[in-house]
Image: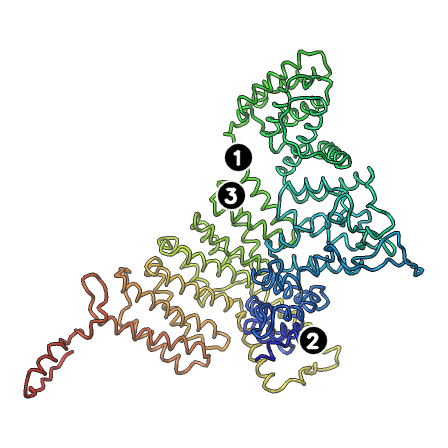
Amino acid sequence: MDKLARLPSERPQDGVRATLEFVFSMHPSSTMMSVAAAEAAVPQKKGALITHEALTLASNLLSKPPKAVSPETWYAGISPQLLGLLDGGEGPELVKAAAYVIGFGILGTKEFGAPGTAGWKFFAEPMLHHIKPPPGASKDSVVDADGVINLSRGQIVVSPENLVTALRRLQSLVVAHPNPGLCKRLLTPLLLPLWALASWPDAKETACEPALSLMKIFLQITASPNLVATLIRNLGYLGGYDKQNPEWVYDGVNGGQIAIVDLRRALRASAPPIIPQGIDQKISKLFEVITLTYSDGDLSTIFLQLLKKWLKSTADSKGLGIKIEQADEEDAVTQLTEMKTLRAMMEKFPEKLAAQPKHILDLAAQLLAAPGEALDGNDEVTGVTLSLLNMVITAPGFQKSHVDPETLRLIESSLDTLSRSSTDASPTATNLRLLLLYRDEIDPDAPTTTAPTDRQVEDRKAYNLAVSYITAADSPPPVRSEGLNLISKLVAARSPALDIPGILVLLATLIADSDEYIYLRIIKLYTLLCNGHPRSVLRDLTDHFVDAKEKHAVDTRLRFGEAILQVIQRMGETFTGGLAEETGHGLLSVAGRRGHRPKTEARQARDTKTQERKEKEAEEAWGGEMPDMSDTMTAEEKLRNEVLEQIVQGWESQRGMEDVRVRTSALSVLGAAVEVNVAGLGQQVVTAAVDLSVAVLQLEREVEKGILRRAAAAFVLSFLNALQKADESGQGLGFGFGPRAQEDVLRTLRYVVDTDEDGLVVEHAREAVAGLEEWQAIKLLPIGRNQQLVFGGGLTRLAGLDINPERSAAATSAAENPTRVRIEEIE
């Protein structure tokens, strides 16, 4: 065992891959899912059909060091192999597997994934340090094409190849298996380096595309306007930690490829200054990024921050008393950048800047009410203020009743003063004063609404942002996961901004996602929604699970079944009444033997004809019957694959019948529902479910129906557990389990134990027999006045037989001679 545990690290070429493929090929869930008709005789390669259970097991094997090996030694051995799998050379499935092991098993844990630990050192730092080198990193001289060392460019810290490799590996880790928390930890220190690479003048450079993708992901999952302010202040960032004298910069070498060079060793002393044309190009790139990743409200916040800084600098130069907070003095390039950004925002999307009218009106009132030269009609500040007022007042949906009365009074007073002045701004002020005065009368038929609170505005903004993250066509998995996280927070807070029908439609679409992390989050979100909207959630899930219109694939329906199970368990005793009966009937209709799906039957007929045509064409091309390509397999392996192929093909239940896997899921959910609240389901549903289980055990004896018979035997056991729980608690069910029904069930179970060839079916049936016999014995014991079974007091009374062990023992010990034995006949 010790040698096997060390195998991944002691085989540097393929130890990790061999371990992954071994687990994926031998895990039961992967084995059953991978044996389809086309793959029955082909072993799995490159992680084909990896299940979540197998992936979790593989992650546990690789992420935790053996007891006899230190974390440093273990991770030093497996990190090159796992990071190499992120490159994609072994296939996309193994990229996902490696990302899961690194992201969740190692870096996702506090013990090994925190900065300073062995996991962080061997998995995070090799990528981060090739994008943003630490101080004192090793360097190589820049060599020109003719072999001459170019001292003017300094020494290479990170080569172009290593830089691109680190970016692509980081992108694979972030996207393949989304972990928003880990994504923030990895990308937070790389914001400026990613921006420098994403805004590189030559956008076709290989390092630009992954850097831009990572930057968009980080901005979307973080969604903080302060990050954009940081980018604007560092628009010309080229590298290093010291802004004035950077230790290293990104520079073009060997024909324009981006590398990281040590600037302090070069002949030039500082980074090249950014020119105005470069500012315009970077501002355009910045707008391209933030308009795709930020909402209108965030853009408005960013605009207000820049506007306040510009107004502060203008007011300070004129000695005006405007109270606007301002950071420390910044260099001229930063001020020029902020001014150009502010002007470009007002020109490109003025309608987006009115997303926060309250803040703009407050700022305008403060500016117009400022003493002195602020009311000079020729002043630039006044012109900008009037433009902002016009933008807000003319926006659709603006109502004076939503404006703070004091703010409205200050604005109207200031506009009146400006309109009577002999300045260039007088006509504009007059028009704005009249427009503000009669704004609510322009459209008298418009409905009058109550002004939303700040909380409602924020919730609506978060909801819209979450929906945009989820529904965007090019949205990567971490961004979609962050959108689901935003919706989960709103659901937990029971925000009125939620559109419940819209969310249910959205979740029903996303649950078909192939990424386990996404659809597992969807199922969890259903359980959160059922707290406030149980009827809507459960009905929607049942409709999709029944799938009367045959729109969903089998895997999607199974996920809906899992969601129904967790919702019912979450509801507990509230799962009762008409909703429980409706859900029970829906599950029974799926689990029954008479379900027919005409569209599925037509599709199966088309697939059969297509397969027959392909086989005929292959035989014609071969000139006879196709040879068997599985000669290298043993007879035992061939037999095993034939049996598995028969099982998998039998699951589809030809001739349009309901899929066996879906029927099994429905019967399993019914068993869980019975244990949750058997009384809530009602007599009709429970009786029909018991009859169905007995019929399945008696009639559906095919080998491919083994999973269905397991579910049927498990349902009987769940039903007995529910009955025993009801007896112990004294709960009245309103129906019983009569002697004749008990005998039928017991006879069927014993028959299954003696004849069934499926080991799990026999085991479940044997447990059900033992449970039923025990329940029958318990029913013979008396019930106390408090409806509690009499346990722990010894044998006192059985039905039809009066026994008092204490009195008998006392009489026997007191008598010197044994008394005559009395035999009594009872029924």
Quarter in which the N terminus is drawn: bottom right
In the image: residue 265, left or right of residue 788: right
Query: Which tag is nearer the camera, tag 2 or tag 3?
Result: 3
Marks 2 and 3, Cα distance to the nearest angstrom?
A: 56 Å
Scheme of colours in the image: rainbow
Give coordinates of residue 787: x percent, y percent. Answer: 22, 62
Residue to which mark 2 is pinned: 616
Type of residue at label 1?
Answer: Asp
Residue to which mark 1 is pinned: 454
Q: Residues within 10 Å of mark 3 (few under 14, many from 20)?
A: some
Quarter in which the C terminus is drawn: bottom left
Give coordinates of residue 362: x percent, y percent. Answer: 59, 26
Residue to which mark 3 is pinned: 498
Name the secondary structure under disc 1: helix
Query: Which tag is nearer the camera, tag 2 or tag 1?
Result: 1
Marks 3 and 1, Cα distance to the nearest angstrom?
A: 16 Å
